[in-house]
Image (tube, rainbow, N blue to C red):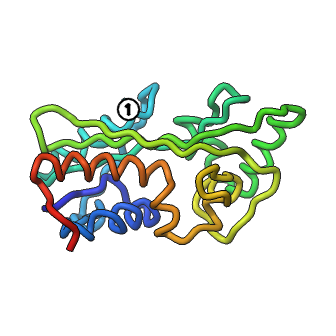
Amino acid sequence: MEIVIASNNFHKISEFKGVLEKYGVKIYSLNDLNIHVEVDETGKTFKENAFLKAEAISKLTDKVVVADDSGLEIRALDNFPGIYSARFMEGHPYSEKFVAINKMLDGKLDRYARFNSTLCVMNLKPEPLYFVGYAEGEVLKKPQGESSFGYDPIFYSYKAKKTFAELSQDEKNAVSHRGEAIKALVKYLEENNYIHEKL
């Protein structure tokens, strides 16, 4: 089976490969297929934005397309930054975003947050399919760990009892929001005989 991930984000591609290649699934990035498309994420939800990305790419390839929209929802900030996680303070390093978010949380006792990953799959069935994963935790006042991917250094995972930035790729796949969404996708693919046991 071949799947195109509607992204060129190295970290996202690695997470998909880390799970799906064990089942003999060939994963392609957009660059691998020489697809260069900018999709305006005008949706109001993760689901809508995932659909917009999947739909745009599905028109350019016959392969199965998986688009992910994900972000950090901080309860005390009314789930901000949410769908704007990547675009919040766009152009600034994440170290500056961490400082800004902690200023917003200043004086608030509730630091609960969760990551949401919503996958939209197209070119598999006539209608789009959706798979959602969550990771629960809280926002730390100072970053911990070596990973520089997004908000990982300030997200303390309740399951892992560490920040995402302190985990190996395999450890993160086991507890992350995207890992959970990918597991749901794998379960669907197995139950419908698109893939079989791990290699």
Where is residue 174 drawn, in percent x and y?
46, 60
Q: Residue furthest right?
A: 107
Q: Quadrant of residue 108?
A: top right
Q: Quadrant of residue 63?
A: bottom left
Relative to the observer, which residue lies in front, 58 or 37?
58
Other residues around mark 1 within 10 Å, as few (<14) / some (14–19) / many (≥20): many
Report the quarter where the N terminus lies: bottom left
Question: The disc labelled 1 sits on which kind of residue?
Answer: Lys
- Name the residue that disc number 1 marks: 47
| 169 sits left or right of 30 in the view | right
| 12 sits left or right of 75 in the view | left
Under tag 1, what secondary structure?
helix
Report the quarter where the C terminus lies: bottom left
Relative to the observer, which residue lies in front, 197 or 144?
197
Disc count in the image? 1
Where is residue 90 drawn, in percent x and y?
62, 47
Residue 182, compared with residue 55, is above or below; it is: below
Kindly identify the residue that appears in the image at 36 percent across and 55 percent down. 7
